[in-house]
Image (cartoon, helix red, strand yellow):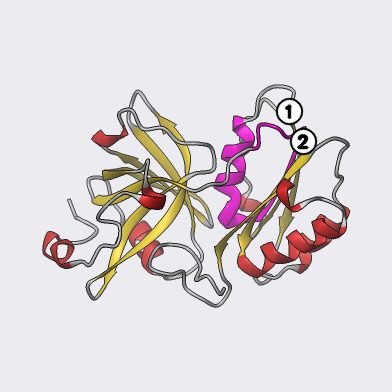
Amino acid sequence: MTDALPQAVMAQLEDPFAQLNGNLAGTRRLQFEVVSSTLLSPHFQRIVLTAAELDGFSYAPGQDVMLLVAADGNRPVRRRYTIRYLDYSGRLLTLDVVLHGDGPGERWIRSARPGDRIEGIGPRGKITTSPEADWHLFIGDEAAMPAILAMTESLPVGSDATIVLEIPDAADEQEFSAAATVRLSWLHRMGGQAGEAARLAAETAEVELPPGRGHAYLLGEARVVLRLREILETRGLPQDQMSPKAYWGRGRANAGHGEPARDA
């Protein structure tokens, strides 16, 4: 059994999240233990965690937990991962984590074994499905796939959803079950560079925007998300019908709080 950070290191951290107030109001600390770790596809690792604090825990589809994966001197380093599933009766929380490099979060994910312990805070995140939308458009890369699939699966019968997902290759496609009517396009990079806008931008320029009041969820690399937002604006979709979210920035590590730096 291994702790992500030794207790001696934890005791020395200058923790800006020691008090769960402000934008952390409504979250809770979660003392996780790893139940299992499985390679789901060439670029995804599935981690199942348990914690006593999951009793009474609630979250909105698309929200995440923030894990304390490392320390930089006396500063905590956290990474955020979308909640893919939560088994309330079993107190089992599933994370599907994209494998794309050698950052502190990925190093912990690759080394995690059953019985290992790690501290988390959750739920985090403001983006979830819009209850007023007549249709839903989800566009993103593999970093956004857990959130996109979780939100799509939460839509009720009679909902209309379109998904455009860019992933490394066909082996990373995932099956999912949704009550909504779903149109899904997989874009395979096939060795291409992650974080380039061209593929998703071309699809965004052509994707059908059905009649009625819809909502678009644009998730992934920071500059790509900005480009997709610009394209939908030119197509007449108002800003209040879009939820953009940068999960990462090409060529830059995320900040210690688990998200891209604000100027990314």
* Percent coordinates x, y for residue 84 in the rendering: 49, 40
The residue that mark 2 highlights is 135
Which residue: 86% across, 60% down?
234
* Percent coordinates x, y for residue 243 in the rendering: 65, 50
* Percent coordinates x, y for residue 118 in the rendering: 26, 52
- The amino acid type of the residue labelled 2 equals Trp
Q: Is residue 149 magenta?
A: yes
Q: CA distance from mark 2 to mark 1?
A: 7 Å
Q: Is residue 230 magenta?
A: no
The residue that mark 1 highlights is 159
Question: Mark 1 falls on what kind of element?
Answer: loop
Which residue: 50% across, 71% down?
261
* Contact? badges 2 and 1 (CB < 8 Å): yes
Left or right: residue 97 versus residue 160 is: left
Give the quarter of the image for residue 193: bottom right
The circle drawn on residue 44 is none
Q: How busy is the neighbourhood of tag 2: few (under 14 within 10 Å), some, or many (20 plus)?
A: many
Q: Quadrant of the C terminus?
A: bottom right
Give the quarter of the image for residue 219: bottom right
Question: Mark 2 falls on what kind of element?
Answer: strand
Which of 187/160 is in front? 160
What residue range appears in magenta? Answer: 130-154
Residue 190 visible from this viewpoint: no
Please say if 173 is above or below 51: below
Residue 70 visible from this viewpoint: yes
Please say if 191 is above or below 245: below
* Percent coordinates x, y for residue 158 in the rendering: 74, 23
Which residue: 38% across, 26% down?
88
Which residue: 38% across, 51% down?
22
